[in-house]
Image (cartoon, coloured by chain):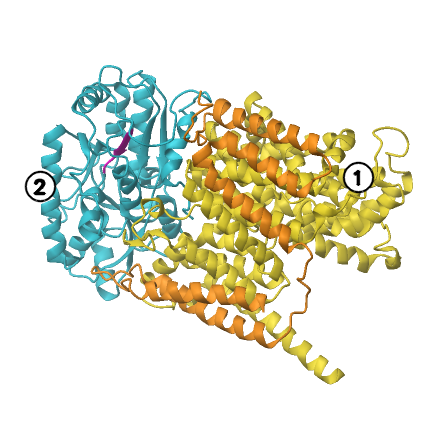
Chain colours: A orange, B cyan, C yellow
Amino acid sequence: MARAAFSGAFLAFALAYTLLAFGLPMMIESGQIGPGFFPRILGTMLVVVSLYSVIRDIREPADDDTSSDHWGTVGLVTVITIAFVAMLSILGALVAMVLFMFVTLYVLNRQGMIANVVLSILLPVSLYLMFDVWLNTTLPRGVFALFSG
Amino acid sequence: MRRSLTRREILRLGGGALAGAYTFALAGCGAHGGGGSQSASAENYPQQTLNWTIAFGPGGGNDIMSRQLIEILQKNDLYTENIVATNLEGGDGARGWGFLYDQKGNSYHISSTSGSFMTTPLAADTPWGPTSFTPIGMLAIDDTLFIVKEDSPYDSLEEFVAAAKEEPLPIGGIATINIDFIMAELLSQQAGFELKYVAFNDEGEMISALVSEALDMIASNPAEVLGLVESGDAKALAFSGKERMRSLPDVPTLDELGYNIDVNTPRGVVLAPGVNKGVQQWWIDTMKKAIKTPAWRQYLKENDLIEKVLWGAEFEDYLTNTQAKLKRTLKEAGAL
Amino acid sequence: MDVFADLIYGFSVALSPVNLLYLAIGVLVGMVVGVMPGLGASAGIAILLPLTFSMDPTSAIVMLAAIYYGAMFGGTITSVLINTPGESSTIASTFDGYPLAQQGRAGPALVLCAVGSFVAGTIGLILLTVLAPAFARLAQSFGPSETFLVVMIGLLTLVVIAGGKWRYGVISALFGFTLATVGVDLGSGDQRYTFGSPELITGINFIPVAIGLFGIGELLYTLHQGEHTEERGFFRVSGRGPELWPKREDWSESGGPMARGSLLGFVVGVIPGAGATVASLMSYSLEKTVSQTPERFGKGALPGLVGPESSNNAASTGSMVPLLTLGIPGSASTAVLLGAFLLWGLQPGPLLMTQNPEFAWGLIGSMYLGNVMLVVLNVFAIPLFANIARIPARIMVPIVIVLCVVGTFSVNGSIIETWIMLGCGVIGFFMKLYGYSPAATVIALVLGPLAEETLRQSLIISGGLSIFYTRSMSLLLLIIIGLLIAAPLALSIYRRRSTRDDR
């Protein structure tokens, strides 16, 4: 059923996309093909194929096994990563990276705490030096701007 | 094929970059990216990498002129920091100039103008118009050359027109509603054939289409196709300038052929909207020096551009008036 | 000979100290990216793309391309030593590579793979050198209609040969196309699907999408498979001594597979849409078919390792042909490379080789040198890279996530793009899980504007669909498309019949 739900998500996307596509003009005044032309074709095709896909997914059982004992870990790491991106602009890249590395390593690699701490500091600092100082790409500094140079 | 730069990329490139063989830069110097307002006072200008947005693809007239100017500005130390050129083509300039429009008040964003600078706001719902920006100046006007493939059955514009009256023949041009289109539209009206205009965003693709015989004729600024004509891969049928081209003296002008088509491409430069007066004046003074350089004189000559210089507010007036004129033409042609 | 002079010129470009330096960096990074499971060449290139913004375009592409073919070498090490493909294109290398490692023959196996990859890379390059200009001439007969059809062929090939369910492949490709329509319409200048956001006016950038789909998506899949709980079964390779070097009979056994793999790989690579992964799998079955001892396959047969390894390298070289001459990528990695070309204002197409010889021939020249570097690196530094392959997934996952996030952010300094990347990561995970084709999505995203523009131009030129069958080249391409659609359909009908008969 999860498989059908994923096809269903594409179907929902396709419907919204197509609905908007039909609001775009098909032709423009000079007689040229307008901005709505291609999206209408695409949207309609995507609706048809994803609808067919949902039906097939519901009707026939999956032939491959997608079960896993590790859904919890997948979800947890996703949530931590979302928090990481959210924290980027608040805490700044360096602090956010250190926290993310530490928390994720804590979840995945509980045996080697010392190594975890070292890695959680070493990698972010070297990345920060590489991107922000050497390459001069601005990484988010966050509200504290502690390490702005 | 043009999923290339996104808006912030240009800023990002500030780390020092280059987009041509000439703009060498050292990594790590220059701008701090990041966006936001980076207005500067004129005294300490320039202090950062300049971001030059080219609203058309590589190899087009706008691209050629922009890169020429950048080379002049850098070689003569007129602009002492880095200059990064970025092609943001698409949507008849709407993409590139739309990007520039979003850089309000940032004195390190510049772009070069084309016919689309006036026509695109007429045709599409753009948030900007030709006078939304900080004008520097107009430098030259560019005319149009009509070319066909070397083995094309048409040796003159008359022959092409005669054939087009029988059956509409596809003519290629850059952008949907632009000078190329207006030119082709007026030609078809005055000659009495039905126009089949095919819009391209990229000069290279348009030339490929001509060479592959998908198109029968293309309208293009001379700079981009002169090489093709000189190498014998294409034949020039007509030129839209008031006088014949120096480099192609055998090609008749549209006037000579009995057409009355008075449109051309204004080649100028503008800064992002709302840049302060000091910086605007700095640029006017700098461009005055740039157009005196031998390299610029050479560029005008080689590409058969006609020098036409208007600075600041005068340039803005010119844009307003020309846009009004183009609007009338397009309305009459039923394209608006 | 023209080509020869061009190639010499290419070497002179590639041999400049700066380009040589970036080539060496690219080759090294490629090896590392290849060795790290969960970080593929496409994600690797996308993450490193921002780092090249301060370079000359030729140096940048030389480096990025080196990452691409370097990863092909690196992926092998992981496949052989820990039975996990470091790259999707080295899946076939696990079949016989890991059994060989279990027999204590990892050293000779890896040396032969490196040599095979080098031979294939070089044969592929010679073919590329000779064929690319010819292809460019052929491509001159390509107008908008042909370009549109080639894009369709590329995507269809990907969907058809990807093996999974075709409906998932089609959805993946269409999804990529829809993403490509966001932003200013290239024809009219009108905005589409931007919802008033200035961030979306210039469209959805392919970099965050590629990093998300291939980087984060792959990592989440690794976790889903529970790899973070596993200790890696690992076989040591000694850096010297007799056990590293292949025996005489190993060499003679590997010659045939190398030659066959090189040719097959190159041909498959040239086909738009079919990439290195397909080539290596095809080579594996070819070797199994021609072998006199097919029963040894899967139990440590050298030809079953060397053939696919040669094949995937030749394919990565072959895929440069459509990329350079048509601007059509055959895989996700080459799609990202194409995006990089466009970033530099380099428009791949029939005119590229004549208009930007420094770039095109410099790249080809650098690939010869890169191959030499890789074979040296592989033979002498295998133990070093083997150590990277040993890093367990539970440590690798957070490292690569950080690289994906920081890499995406650094492109444009855009937090919105970072969110897009993350969203694509979750989508990419489910796509991988259920057998969709993230590669089709990325290729469609990169080629979407081209497909739309050329379709529009074609329709205007002919005032209808006639252009697609009145031009002989278009007709030929249309027939190929017909076959691509008909073949799997016929196959599935046939299969259904035979299963019914079985009952």
Give the quadrant of the C terminus of chain A: top left
For label 2, the crowd category at 10 Å Cα-Cα, with few meaning under 14, some 14 to 19 and many 20 or more, is few
Q: Position of residue B144 (x, y in %)?
A: 22, 43
The residue tagged 2 is B321
Q: Quadrant of the N terminus of chain A?
A: bottom right
Q: Residues within 10 Å of mark 1 (few under 14, many from 20)?
A: many
Tell me the kind of residue under disc 2.
Answer: Asn
Q: Position of residue A78 (x, y in %)?
A: 56, 48
Give the overall secondary structure of the magenta segment: strand
Give me the residue at 18% from left, 55% from top.
B185
Q: Is residue C127 left or right of residue A131?
A: right
Q: Secondary structure at mark 1?
A: helix
The residue to which callout 1 is attached is: C110
What range is drawn magenta here? B109-113
In screen coordinates, is A62 left or right of C194? Answer: right
Relative to residue C65, is residue A51 drawn left or right? left
> Picture quarter containing residue B76?
top left
Q: Position of residue C77 (x, y in %)?
A: 75, 40
* Number of the label disc, if any, that sits on residue B87: none
Asked if the stretch drawn in magenta spans residue C401, the answer is no
Which residue corresponds to the image point at 35% horizontal and 58% vertical from the top-left?
C457
- Circle 1 chain: C
- Amino acid under disc 1: Leu
- Rendering coords of residue B217 (x, y %): 29, 52
Comparing labels 1 and 2, the label whose residue is closer to the camera: 1
Task: Please tell me which residue lies in front, B335 or C25.
Answer: C25
In three-dimensional space, the C-alpha distance between marks 1 and 2, rounded to whole angstroms, equals 72 Å
Going 77% across and 33% down the picture, which residue do you hit?
C382
- Residue C225 drawn above or below residue C362: below
Magenta stretch: includes residue B111: yes
Up the image or down, C463 lies above or below C298; here it is below
